[in-house]
Amino acid sequence: MAERKIPLRKCVGCGEMKDKRELRRIVRNKEGEISLDTTGKKPGRGAYICNNQECLIKAMKAHKLDKAFSASVSEEIYEKLREEIGHD
């Protein structure tokens, strides 16, 4: 049997390519609303971040999510990410 390809995505914080399932997905839909995607299946432009605080801090300081979406990401989204990553 052929091996299945592992989908890789780049973390906006550290820039490393990692398995998609190890990362958190943030998505911007057509209306411009930005939210966390816990299922990984929401439609829209996605950005991924590692499950550690260091990557989140790097992404926040350099406004990497803002650049990925060409829109400003609210503090509420960063707060939700902090909560989710802190519990893992």
Image (tube, grey):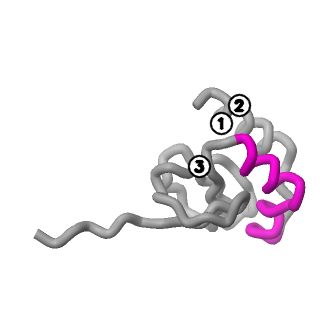
Q: Quadrant of residue 15?
A: bottom right
Task: State the residue at coordinates (87%, 61%).
Answer: 62
Distance between mark 1 and mark 3 Cα atoms: 9 Å
Distance between mark 2 and mark 1 Cα atoms: 6 Å
Q: Amino acid at mark 3?
A: Arg
Q: Which mark is residue 71?
A: none
Residues at marks 2 and 1 touching, judged by CB atoms closer than 8 Å? yes
Task: State the residue at coordinates (21%, 68%).
Answer: 3
Position in image of residue 22 (x %, y %): 50, 49
Horizontally, residue 26 falls left or right of residue 68, namely: left
Graded by Cα atoms within 10 Å as few (under 14), some (14 to 19) or many (20 or more), the crowding at tag 3 reads: many
Position in image of residue 60 (x %, y %): 84, 52
Give the residue number, with chain letter if any, for mark 2: 83
Farthest left residue in view: 1
Position in image of residue 26 (x %, y %): 65, 54
Position in image of residue 13 (x %, y %): 73, 58
Q: Which residues are magenta?
A: 53-70
Horizontally, residue 8 falls left or right of residue 33, namely: left
Task: State the residue at coordinates (64%, 47%).
Answer: 36
Earlier along the polypeptide chain: callout 1 or callout 3? 3
Give the residue number, with chain letter if any, for mark 1: 85
Graded by Cα atoms within 10 Å as few (under 14), some (14 to 19) or many (20 or more), the crowding at tag 2 reads: few
Q: Secondary structure at mark 2?
A: helix
Q: Secondary structure at mark 3?
A: strand
Give the residue number, with chain letter if any, for mark 3: 24
Q: Secondary structure at mark 1?
A: helix
Tell me if residue 81 comes above or below residue 2 in the rendering: above
Q: Is residue 44 magenta?
A: no
